[in-house]
Each structure stands twice: as structure tokens, then as C-alpha cells.
Amino acid sequence: MEIRLLKSSFDDDGSASDHQHTACFVVNGAVAFDAGSLAMAIGADRPNVRDIVLSHTHLDHIAGLPLFIDDLFSTLRSPIRVHASLTMIEALRSHIFNDVIYPNFEEISNEFGPVLEFREYEFEREFSVADISILPIKVNHNEPSAGFIVSDASGSIALTGDTADTSAIWEAAGQLKDLRAIVVECAFPESMTKLAATARHLTPLGLKAELRKLGRRDLPVYVANIKPMFREQVVAEIEELGLSNVRIFPVGGVISV
């Protein structure tokens, strides 16, 4: 399995930055998990991505979704399939694809037919897209938010999405004999613990406590979704934890498991 974290920021000289403002992972070049920078940074995988799986509807996770559909509108021979919970779908219909913020792409077709199709997923019920099996699991962020167990023929990963302290995804991951890696958030430094708790995100010490729930130190853990203004501080604090299996997911990079 290959997981790519799309870039989403620019340095002062205009080059792509290691700072991450939005969230979008592409698995096996075919399925996007969230769509923060999907339209802007997908690159060569653009013709292959037709399924987008949403963890929740905060703007940094959906910002690129309308633009991605817009970019592909005239060439789509089948609709972009957006997989989300019913509450998330209703939020997108009410607040994004409402002919105020953006056109209602459910009601607009190109010469080949519809360009957007919402597909409801249920928590704790597995579904499959593009030879990938996906199990959505509730995590502790806004209501509702999902983490995912993502599996293909090579094995499984746990992708937490945004979360604070949680339990169900660790329980599910701990039962997997083919678990290959964890991709987890860590948004704020320890100096922002109060804000992290309010916004339901992790700090480095919170991350350490969460990983104890998994009960394994043999798996690689990749940290992503670090708030860009605190990136250097969070990275330094994670390194100070001395957890040999924990590393930072390189923004724009690909991991293979």
C-alpha cells in the first residue's frame, strides 16, 4: 500500500512548503482520504482519483473538493463519488453545494451524465472502493468524525484523521494481524494543551498516551496534520519523547507499507 500526503502550503519564494494547512491523503494513487488540497496538489494521480472518503467536514479537509469536481467537469464520464456519513453529506449539501457557496453539482450534468454522487457510509461497517477496504470508526473530534482502517492485499493501516483522546480505533487496530502502520495527527505543542482539548486535537504527550492504547512498539507511526504555525515546535517535542517508531510524515511524501 502506498499513502501520499499532498502538499498544501507555499514558502515565501513560492515553492511548496513542509507546512500543512489542509489534509488530503491519496492511497494507491486512486482513493483520496479528505480533500483539503486535492484540486491543487493531486498532480499525476488526477485522472485516477474518482473516490473521495471524508473523515469530517471541517474546511481544511474539504476545501479542494468543489474545485476538484469543477476542474474535471467536462471530462468526467462517471461521477466523482464522495463517501461520507449522512450527517456529513447533509452538511455539504446545505453549506457547500448550495448554489451560494458553490454550484449544486448533484443537479448539474455534463454531456456524459452526473458529475457528483454522494455515497453514505456507516460507522463500523466496512465498504470497498478501488480494491481497498475501508472501515470507518468514530473518533473524538467534531461530531461526527471518522478514522479509518484501510486495507488492501498487502495489509492494513490505521488512519486516525483529526482526533483527541479516543479508543475505538485503537481497539480495532490492535486486533489486526496484518496491521502495517499508523497515521495519526498531532496538531498542537504542549504550550497549547488547553486549546488542543477545546478543539479536540492531540499534543505530543497526548499522542504518546494514545499510542499506549495500541500496546505495540513494533509498528511505524507517521505523524501528520500538524498545525503549520507550530510545526517546528511540535516536531521537536515529538523527537524529545524518544519513541523510536514514531516519525513525521513528510508533507508531499509517500510511504509504502
Image (cartoon, rainbow, N blue to C red):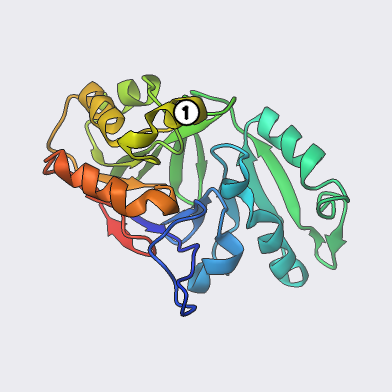
Residue 178 in the image: x percent, y percent? Answer: 24, 37
Q: What residue would you read off at disc 1?
A: 200
| Residue at figure coordinates x 55%, y 59% from the top left | 37
Q: Is residue 68 left or right of residue 35?
A: right
| Residue at figure coordinates x 77%, y 71% from the top left | 74
Residue 73 in the image: x percent, y percent? Answer: 75, 66
Q: Residues within 10 Å of mark 1 (few under 14, many from 20)?
A: some
In the image, residue 121 above or below residue 4? above
Residue 169 in the image: x percent, y percent? Answer: 37, 26
- Disc 1 is placed on an element classified as loop
Q: Is residue 96 left or right of residue 254?
A: right
Amino acid beneath label 1: Arg
Q: Is residue 4 left or right of residue 69?
A: left
| Residue at figure coordinates x 39%, y 22% from the top left | 166
Residue 93 in the image: x percent, y percent? Answer: 79, 40
| 227 or 195, nearer to the observer | 195
**Residue extending farthest bottom:** 13
